[in-house]
């Protein structure tokens, strides 16, 4: 019976099953060992360095404030430590250039020009992983404060570099508290240093200076055939012409600089030359605008009425329609330039814009701030001022002070935004024709009525294209020069049709300016060819003919002199017979 119960085949099968089971266990154990080994290698290569780097960076953040991390709450002296925020490792600084609207809502072709900044390499030093967004260390990231600080430094630096202020850009990134551990900040600083090293140095003697008068907004009103039309046609440009000129110069690489970029006024009264550094292909120029006073005679002739602050604190021009509707926008040179630079920051050197030349006899920036509006001195009032006071019988001391306060607020905003002021003399005088005593009286009135609003300035831009000497340098025996120097003036501007005209005599800088107006474009287009092609910018709304200028004796000018050599056709003849330049009777 026992032999019958024994089955050798069944026994063999059982033995084979036991053997197979042992083999499976051996294989499973080997796989487990392999997985554990791979995990150990991964931890050694990836996880441990990440944790170490994160710890070092967080310790630096905490160390800057001298605070210790709480062991049980995860806070630093009550300030939460955000461990899940993404670590900032790259910033693309992109200036949105959009479209800038002009005063009546039309676009002014404001295409963006700011450069983009490439993202920096991974801050962990592990270049084996591709960037997939914000860089993190394991499941945690650098604090939000650190990320924001790096972000802010890079954006500030990009803004400065866009305006060629490479030293300022380097200072912005190097002053960031995370500079020593941020490869991105270090790379940005190195890039700005290299760009500066490759810049071209410009001497002041190679810088041109152009100027305009108040810009015509509505040509149909300016050129309506009345007594003022001829003067407007000679001395002014339309907004269409101005915007075309500026856009052309920008496309050709011109960059606005300040006259103070060209020189340094030292404590001992000496004036020395500066260099201007610009990338290859860029050309510096100075821009100025004369008579930003918005004289009475211009009312209703297609010009802005004054400069104002809008709801955002920006300087804009006020324009009054025939029906009394008041518009606020880019109706004159200054707000147009502001909007253009906002869209094209590389049109401005270090954020500097133009120089605003002011008289004072009818107020400042369109506000009736001169003392005569308050005193109503009959011997000094012009017919224009008399009409204004008759039309505004409630213009009392309180109203006058409100005008002064409003003008001061506008002036402060202009200075904060890169503009400078210059004296154009209080009464729009020719100093040599007025005499030294008359010049002193005029200077005192400018300081009492204009400087009190716009602040001190060391720039004087002579009216009428006048000067206080011939083409030779100012000397110490020139009594006009000595007096004006004593009054704080260091930069003197005349009018000259040369491309560039700059002189240094050791104690001042003297600069010639090129008038851009209807007269110059009509008669001397060749003198402007380095800046723009007159035929490309000429406004067809102008009259077909621009009359020649006449001097005081009625002699025709040959066009080689300034368009300011004679008084404007808009001069009030009855007032001129009664008064003189210093009493505010000369108009342009």
Image (cartoon, rainbow, N blue to C red):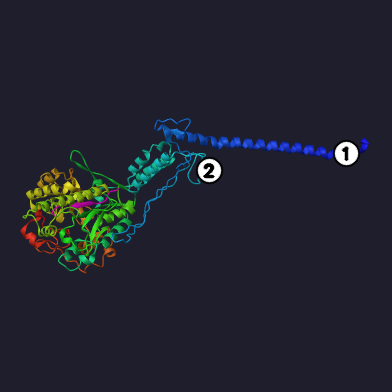
Disc on res. 367? none
Is residue 471 in view from this perspective? Answer: no
- Residue position marked by numbered label 1 in the rendering: 8
- Residue 575 magenta-drawn? no
User: Which quadrant of the figure contains the N terminus?
Assistant: top right
- Residue 360 magenta-drawn? yes
Residue count near mark 2 (Cα–Cα under 10 Å), binned few <14, some 14–19, many ≥20: few
Name, please, the residue furthest toward the front.
394
Up/down of 71 relative to 265, above or below = above
Residue 12, image x and y in percent? 84, 39
Query: Which residue is nearer to you in this view: 34 or 3?
Result: 3
Residue 78, image x and y in percent? 42, 34
Horizontally, residue 481 falls left or right of residue 328, namely: left
Query: Which residue is nearer to you in this view: 308 or 113?
Result: 308
SS at mark 1? helix
Which residue is at 52% across, 45% downward?
130
Which residue is at 27% across, 65% downward?
535
- Residue position marked by numbered label 2 in the rendering: 129
Residue 123, image x and y in percent? 47, 40
- Judged by depth in the image, the label closer to the viewer, 1 or 2, is 1
**Picture mark count:** 2
Query: Which residue is nearer to you in this view: 275 or 61?
Result: 61
The magenta region covers: 351-361
Horizontally, residue 461 falls left or right of residue 93, namely: left
User: Which quadrant of the figure contains the C terminus?
Assistant: bottom left
Q: Residue 523 occupies which quadrant of the picture?
A: bottom left
């Amino acid at each position: 019976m026992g032999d019958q119960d024994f089955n050798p085949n069944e026994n063999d099968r059982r033995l084979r099953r036991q053997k197979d089971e042992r083999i499976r266990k051996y294989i499973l154990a080997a796989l487990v060992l392999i997985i554990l080994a791979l995990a150990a290698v991964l931890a050694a290569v990836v996880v441990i360095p990440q944790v170490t780097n994160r710890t070092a960076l967080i310790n630096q953040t905490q160390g800057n404030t001298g605070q210790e991390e709480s062991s049980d709450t995860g806070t630093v002296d009550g300030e939460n430590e955000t461990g899940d925020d993404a670590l900032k490792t790259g910033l693309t600084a992109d200036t949105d250039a959009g479209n800038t609207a002009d005063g009546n809502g039309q676009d002014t072709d404001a295409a963006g020009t700011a450069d983009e900044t490439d993202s920096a390499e991974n801050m962990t030093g592990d270049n084996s992983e591709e960037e997939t967004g914000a860089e993190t260390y394991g499941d945690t990231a650098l604090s939000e404060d650190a990320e924001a600080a790096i972000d802010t430094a890079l954006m500030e630096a990009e803004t400065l570099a866009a305006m060629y202020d490479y030293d300022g850009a380097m200072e912005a990134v190097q002053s960031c508290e995370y500079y020593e551990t941020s490869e991105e900040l270090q790379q940005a600083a190195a890039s700005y240093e290299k760009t500066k090293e490759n810049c071209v140095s410009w001497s002041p003697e190679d810088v041109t200076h152009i100027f305009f008068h108040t810009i015509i907004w509505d040509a149909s009103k300016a050129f309506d055939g009345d007594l003022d039309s001829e003067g407007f046609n000679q001395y002014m440009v339309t907004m269409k012409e101005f915007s075309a000129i500026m856009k052309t110069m920008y496309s050709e690489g011109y960059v606005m600089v300040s006259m103070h970029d060209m020189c340094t006024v030292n404590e001992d009264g000496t004036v020395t030359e500066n260099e201007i550094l610009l990338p290859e292909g860029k050309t510096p120029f100075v821009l100025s605008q004369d008579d930003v006073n918005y004289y009475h005679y211009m009312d209703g002739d297609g010009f802005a009425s004054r400069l104002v602050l809008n709801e955002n604190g920006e300087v804009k021009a006020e324009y009054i329609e025939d029906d009394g509707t008041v518009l606020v926008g880019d109706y004159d040179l200054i707000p147009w330039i502001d909007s253009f630079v906002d869209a094209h920051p590389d049109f401005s050197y270090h954020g500097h814009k133009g120089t605003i030349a002011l008289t004072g006899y009818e107020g400042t920036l369109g506000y009736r701030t001169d003392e005569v509006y308050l005193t109503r001195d009959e011997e000094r009032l012009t017919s224009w001022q008399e009409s204004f006071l008759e039309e505004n019988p409630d213009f009392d001391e309180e109203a006058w002070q409100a005008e002064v306060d409003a003008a001061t607020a506008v002036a402060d905003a202009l200075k904060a935004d890169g503009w400078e002021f210059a004296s154009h003399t209080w009464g729009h005088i020719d100093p040599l024709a007025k005499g030294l005593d008359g010049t002193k009286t005029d200077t005192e009135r400018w300081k009492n009525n204009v400087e009190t609003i716009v602040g001190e300035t060391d720039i004087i831009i002579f009216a009428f294209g006048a000067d206080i000497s011939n083409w030779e340098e100012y000397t110490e025996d020139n009594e006009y020069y000595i007096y004006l120097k004593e009054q704080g003036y260091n930069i003197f501007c005349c009018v000259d049709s040369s491309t560039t005209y700059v002189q240094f005599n050791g104690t001042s800088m003297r600069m010639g300016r090129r008038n851009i107006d209807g007269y110059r474009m009509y008669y001397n287009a060749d003198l402007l060819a380095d800046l723009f092609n007159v035929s490309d910018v000429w406004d067809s709304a102008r009259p077909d003919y621009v009359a020649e200028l006449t001097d005081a004796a009625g002699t025709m000018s040959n066009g080689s002199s300034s368009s300011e050599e004679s008084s404007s056709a808009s001069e009030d003849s009855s007032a001129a017979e009664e008064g003189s330049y210093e009493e505010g009777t000369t108009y342009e």
